[in-house]
């Protein structure tokens, strides 16, 4: 945790979002926010490019599109963050909210692009743009839909997101996606590289302090990268080819109308909006010891949606508020939005330099695998933590059991839906949407209390199963 010195300001000033600390302290704190979210911000672009088939093999003619997506991830994370910190009109909470590329949409995006190459990205961007507009339209009503998403539902959704991604982490650590893969897939060298990242990350997370602890995953990736370099696994060919400066390209991937993408992104917008509400509340409670106002929550949701729609116009993925930066504010106790604005400017600067994206693209997939195993595991852990707040009555256990069984089952066995129309199949095999939909409907439809006789039956059934397991 960064030590807050008295030179930063008084206790009351540090709780004020409009307070500007001295630049000598503000700049390092702003860079710290970027380091805390940097890896998580660019990882979704790498995953989606890999799923589509142009994220591996630097000799592929489509590979420059990966560099472009990484570049746009940084640029529009910075722009969306400015929407939050500076704001305009009703857009933006004017709080130190850091925006970044959302992991939540990955289970929806992978079925849309899987193995289809760059040609599938136009349909994906259709979903990003329309979903972002829909997300913004939720802003005036976001407070009213919270009742439909209690910890039982949100915890289930977050857990499902993590479970959908852990397979990707293992594949990357082993050497990439097997269908695209190489003979050395799963080799000892590949796993050694991934383990170097994991061990280094854990070491810095638990035995270091301050910035070194906050940036543990980034440091783990750097150490793993250096190790992979000495193993001959790093090539800088694309860095030499990349431009030193480039502006974003409107409709870089085109635009293709897709019902499946629109439905998927609009449904996920509900989940993302509630996530943002939680992050805004976490920032005001952790940094200023107060509840978030309705105006701040509405403005943050507007910024989420507008930032996502704008990103989609230029070939970037959906944006959302980043929870790791909420935790950073709770640790530092500095609420200044101007500090986060400095971090946003740094992200925009990096996003305009393709060589930065090219350098990131040289990271071997095994190195990234070590990092995402930790990140995706933490997503599952966050979901379990949210579920710990649930009152595990028989009713809630049934809702959770049915939702996760069907959602995870369809994700693991997509062939079970081979006779379902394409649009429905894409949405259902994500696993996340059916699980969330079932949980929401059952939570609203089932009575809070079950009759004594029925409760006894259900409880007895579970108790008997427990005894059998013993």
Image (tube, grey):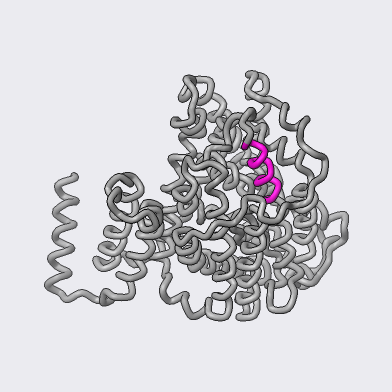
**Image coords of residue 245 (percent x, y):** 82, 44
The image quadrant of residue 150 is bottom left
Q: Nearer the viewer, residue 247 or 270?
A: 247
Residue 72 on the magenta segment: yes
Q: Main secondary structure of the magenta part?
A: helix
Determine whether, in the image, residue 452 is placed left or right of residue 306. left
Residue 262 on the magenta segment: no
Magenta region: which residues? Answer: 62-73
**Image coords of residue 109 (percent x, y):** 49, 52
Question: For the point 74% across and 52% down, which residue is it?
Answer: 248
Determine whether, in the image, residue 465 is placed left or right of residue 124. left
Taking 100 as reference, is 447 above or below it?
below
Picture mark count: 0
**Image coords of residue 166 (percent x, y):** 45, 42
Does the image show residue 202? no
Question: For the point 47% across and 50% down, which residue is it?
Answer: 112
**Image coords of residue 99 (percent x, y):** 65, 59
Determine whether, in the image, residue 266 is placed left or right of residue 309. left
Question: For the point 36% across and 69% down, which residue is it?
Answer: 440
Taking 251 as reference, is 238 above or below it?
above
Does the image show residue 262? yes
Question: For the point 39% across and 65% down, which residue is it?
Answer: 153
């Amino acid at each position: 945790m960064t030590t807050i010195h008295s030179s930063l300001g008084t206790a009351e000033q540090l709780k004020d979002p409009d307070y500007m600390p001295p630049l000598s302290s503000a700049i390092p704190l702003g860079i710290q926010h970027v380091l805390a979210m940097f890896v998580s911000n660019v990882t979704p672009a790498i995953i989606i490019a890999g799923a589509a088939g142009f994220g591996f093999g630097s000799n592929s003619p489509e590979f420059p599109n990966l560099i472009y997506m990484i570049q746009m991830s940084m640029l529009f994370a910075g722009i969306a963050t400015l929407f939050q910190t500076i704001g305009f009109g009703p857009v933006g909470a004017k709080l130190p909210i850091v925006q970044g590329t959302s992991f939540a949409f990955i289970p929806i995006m992978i079925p849309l692009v899987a193995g289809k190459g760059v040609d599938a990205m136009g349909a994906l961007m259709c979903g990003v743009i329309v979903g972002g507009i829909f997300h913004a339209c939720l802003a005036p009503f976001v407070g009213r839909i919270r009742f439909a998403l209690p910890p039982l539902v949100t915890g289930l959704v977050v857990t499902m997101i993590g479970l959908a991604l852990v397979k990707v982490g293992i594949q990357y650590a082993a050497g990439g996606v097997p269908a695209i893969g190489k003979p050395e897939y799963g080799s000892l060298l590949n796993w050694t590289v991934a383990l170097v990242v994991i061990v280094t990350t854990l070491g810095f997370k638990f035995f270091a302090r301050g910035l070194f602890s906050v940036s543990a995953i980034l440091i783990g990736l750097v150490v793993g990268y250096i190790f992979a370099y000495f193993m001959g696994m790093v090539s800088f060919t694309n860095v030499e080819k990349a431009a030193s400066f480039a502006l974003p390209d409107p409709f870089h991937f085109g635009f293709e109308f897709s019902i499946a993408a629109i439905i998927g992104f609009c449904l996920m917008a509900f989940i993302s909006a509630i996530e943002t509400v939680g992050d805004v509340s976490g920032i005001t409670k952790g940094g200023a010891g107060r509840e978030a106002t309705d105006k701040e929550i509405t403005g943050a949701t507007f910024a989420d949606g507008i930032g996502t729609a704008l990103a989609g116009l230029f070939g970037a993925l959906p944006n959302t508020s980043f929870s790791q930066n909420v935790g950073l504010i709770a640790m530092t106790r500095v609420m200044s939005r101007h500090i986060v604005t400095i971090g946003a400017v740094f992200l925009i600067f990096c996003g305009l330099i393709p060589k930065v994206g090219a350098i990131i693209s040289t990271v071997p997939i095994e190195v990234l695998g070590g990092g995402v195993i930790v990140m995706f595991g933490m997503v599952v852990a966050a979901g379990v933590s949210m579920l710990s707040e649930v009152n595990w009555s028989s009713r809630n256990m049934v809702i959770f059991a049915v939702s996760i069984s069907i959602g995870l089952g369809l994700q693991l066995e997509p062939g079970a839906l081979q006779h379902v129309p394409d649009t429905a199949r894409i949405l259902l095999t994500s696993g996340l949407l059916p699980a969330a939909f079932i949980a929401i409907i059952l939570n609203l439809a089932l009575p809070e209390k079950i009759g004594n006789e029925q409760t006894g039956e259900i409880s007895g059934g579970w108790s008997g199963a427990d005894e059998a397991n013993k």
